[in-house]
Image (tube, rainbow, N blue to C red):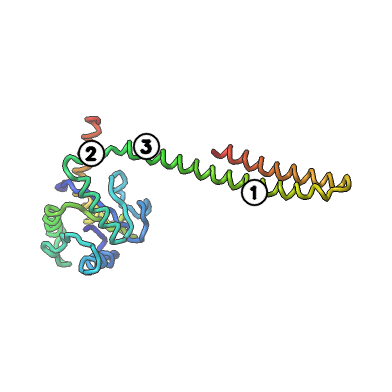
Amino acid sequence: MIFDGDTDMWAYAYLKGWKSNENMNFNFYDAHDIRPLSDRASEETVKNALRLRFSSAKQVVVLVGENTKNLYRFVRWEIEIAANARLADHCRQRERGP
Amino acid sequence: MPQTLDLPIIVVNVNGDREMDPNRRPPILRDWVAAHVAFKAKLIQHAAAAIVLVEQPGFNLKLTGLFTSLASALIAWLQVKQHKEIAQSYSVAELELDFIQEQAQYVTTDRELSNFVGDAENAVSREHTLWTARRDRS
């Protein structure tokens, strides 16, 4: 789950709420539960933890809010990690043809 | 250089938009094929399930055939819709001409005859104008 923690935490909280609601058929594997981070963690520590989280993920959900596009240090970096391999794979497939 | 992984992406617009929002979307996602959905539990769950299906080894959906069929169905639907419009329009014109025909028995003067002919021509003219407009549109 990639999102702007300053502005869109409410949306993430909603998802967790839906997940815990027995009357809703909504479920997701929350990689945020793996190695929780403190606010004082260094950038490298955070990125290491995020790499660990990605290694167990099957899909990535990006919550796009008002300020998401302006966040480069973590949000963009996380999307890059998820997207680059597939972009490269897509380009290779296009070069090879149908 | 970041480590890269091979993960499908679901983009959820927290403002509720169902489609990709070019004003809010992070630039890196511009050229990226991702599922863009609104902030609804069912939509997110369906997108995730669809991705799981598409990611299955051996899954090879021929989208060209699907889109061709959808386009054919859309054209057929539009033509049926247009046929209904024409049928309704002709019914209205028929009623109007019937009504005008009823007036014929009350025509006694040249002035009334002129008005009667004028009404009949206008009714046909309206229908002709509508028909021409529909033909230009189709």
Near-viewer residue (B40 or A49): B40
For the C terminus of chain A, give its image quadrant. Answer: top left
Relative height, residue B72 to residue A27 (above, below):
above
Q: Is residue A51 left or right of residue B136?
A: left
Q: Is residue B2 left or right of residue B124?
A: left
N-term-proximal mark, 3 vs 1: 3
Residue hosting label 1 = B92
N-term-proximal mark, 3 vs 2: 2
Return the x and y of residue B63 as percentages of the image width and height. Answer: 30, 39
Near-viewer residue (B31 or A74): B31
Q: Amino acid at mark 3?
A: Thr
Residue hosting label 2 = B60
User: Within 10 angstroms of label 3, few (less than 14), some, or many (20 or more) residues?
Assistant: few
Residue A80 in view, yes or no: no
- How far apart marks 3 and 1 lie (CA) works out to 36 Å
Say which chain tag 2 marks: B
- How far apart marks 1 and 2 lie (CA) works out to 52 Å
For the N terminus of chain A, give its image quadrant. Answer: bottom left
Q: Residue at x 13, y 65 (%)?
A: A36
Say which chain tag 1 marks: B
Say which chain tag 3 marks: B
Q: Residue at x 46, y 43 (%)?
A: B77
Return the x and y of residue B118 as percentages of the image width and height. Answer: 78, 44
Near-viewer residue (B53 or A63): B53
